[in-house]
Image (cartoon, grey):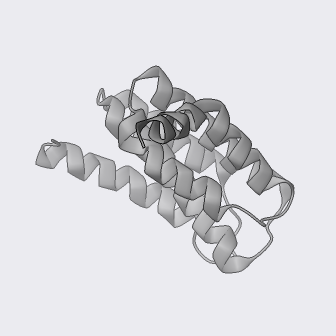
Amino acid sequence: MLTPNEEEILNKYKKIIEKQFGDRGEVLRYPVIKKAIKDFSKVSANKEQIAEIMVFTVECGVDFTRAYGDIDERFYLTVSSIYRQALEYIVKNDLEEKFVDRSRRLAERSQGIGWGFGDAMVEFYYDYLGHMEEEEETED
């Protein structure tokens, strides 16, 4: 459970990131996005919040490209790299249960998006969280 102050800080950084995915006509400032994640990681010791800010960033990226259409290669490389880092962090910190559904939805929602983005997202998902699918099948 987050304290009100922790929630406020998380929301502050989410707004910084969300602002970078504004209108299609704006130039995306990748360094601002990456710096917000890095800075947040310095002010929060909460591993779940750190994973949250990374997953949230990827959600913003996927929503942005679905809303505005094809972006450029740098955009897709940046967003997929953050996704990979998020998945790596999630696994390293035993947060799979909390993020597997959102991570799967991101891989699914990225299908059909250009520059090999969707393929990379699915590959990263299965590399890091594919075992979760196998566990679900075994339980059935």
- Left or right, 18 with respect to 68, comes to left
Where 40 falls versus 8 (above or below)? Answer: above
| Number of on-image labels | 0
Q: Residue at x 39, y 50 (%)?
A: 13
For the view shown, which residue lies furthest in the front direction?
140
The residue nearer to you, when weighing 108 against 87, is 108
**Residue 38 point in image, percent of width and height:** 50, 34
Up the image or down, 27 lies above or below 84; here it is: below
**Picture residue at 62% right of the left edge, 64% below the top:** 109
* Residue 40, quarter of picture: top left
Q: Front-most of 138 and 42?
A: 138
Seen in the picture, residue 87 relative to 27 is either above or below; the reply is above
- In the picture provided, is 35 more to the left or to the right than 3? right
Q: If the image is split into quadrants, where does the N terminus sit?
A: top left
- On the image, the x and y values in percent for residue 25 come to 71, 78
Answer with left or right where residue 46 lies relative to residue 28: left
In the rendered image, residue 54, in percent from the top left (x then y), is placed at 49, 43
Q: Position of residue 84 (x, y in %)?
A: 64, 37
In front of the other: 140 or 9: 140
Q: Is residue 24 visible?
A: no
Q: In this picture, is 129 found above or below 103?
A: above
- Whether residue 72 is visible to the viewer of this picture, yes or no, is yes
Q: Residue at x 49, y 62 (%)?
A: 18
For this view, does 39 lie left or right of residue 123? left
Q: Can you say which quadrant of the picture contains the C terminus?
A: top left
